[in-house]
Amino acid sequence: MGIWIMAGVTFREAARKKMLWMALAAGGAFLTLFGTGLHFQAKDFAAHSMSPVLRREISLTMLTNDHSHLGRHTLR
C-alpha cells in the first residue's frame, strides 16, 4: 500500500514540475517519427520485388530487434 502512495506522490510532483508532460511529449514524438520511418520502409518494400522470406526477416528484425534467428555469428 505504501508503494502506491509514493508512486502517486511522485507522479503528482512530476506533473507539477511539467517533467511528466515533457516525457509524454518526447515519447509521442518518438512514436510519430518511428511510425513515419516504418511507413516509408513498408512503402519501399512494396515498390521493390524481393522474396517474401527476406521481407519477413527484415521486418521481424527491425520490429523486434531480435537477431537470434539469424544464427550464432550475429553481432550484438
Image (cartoon, rainbow, N blue to C red):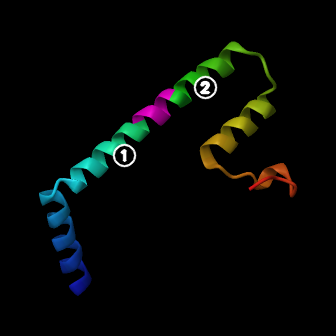
Crowd class of label 1 (few under 14; some 14 to 19; many from 20; radius 10 Å): few
Residue 40: image quadrant is: top right
- In the displayed structure, does residue 14 sit left or right of residue 48? left
Residue sitting nearer the eye, 14 or 34: 14
Residue behind mark 2: 41
- In the displayed structure, does residue 10 sit left or right of residue 46? left
Which amino acid does the dot numbered 2 rest on?
Answer: Gln
Crowd class of label 2 (few under 14; some 14 to 19; many from 20; radius 10 Å): few
Query: Residue 49 at x, y = what percent?
Result: 77, 16
Query: Residue 6 at x, y = what percent?
Result: 21, 78
Viewport quadrant of the N terminus: bottom left
Is the stretch drawn in magenta largely helix, strand or loop?
Answer: helix
Residue behind mark 1: 27
- In the displayed structure, does residue 30 sit left or right of residue 15? right
Q: Secondary structure at mark 2?
A: helix
Which amino acid does the dot numbered 1 rest on?
Answer: Gly
Query: Residue 64 at x, y = what percent?
Result: 62, 48
Q: Is residue 1 above or below residue 39?
A: below
Check residue 35 for magenta coloring: yes
For marks 1 and 2 on the same chain, the one whose residue lies earlier in the sequence: 1
Q: Residue at x 17, y 53 (%)?
A: 18
Check residue 42 for magenta coloring: no
Q: Marks 1 and 2: which is nearer the front?
A: 1
Q: Is residue 2 above or below residue 44?
A: below
Q: Secondary structure at mark 1?
A: helix
Q: Is residue 42 above or below residue 27?
A: above
Q: Residue at x 81, y 25 (%)?
A: 51
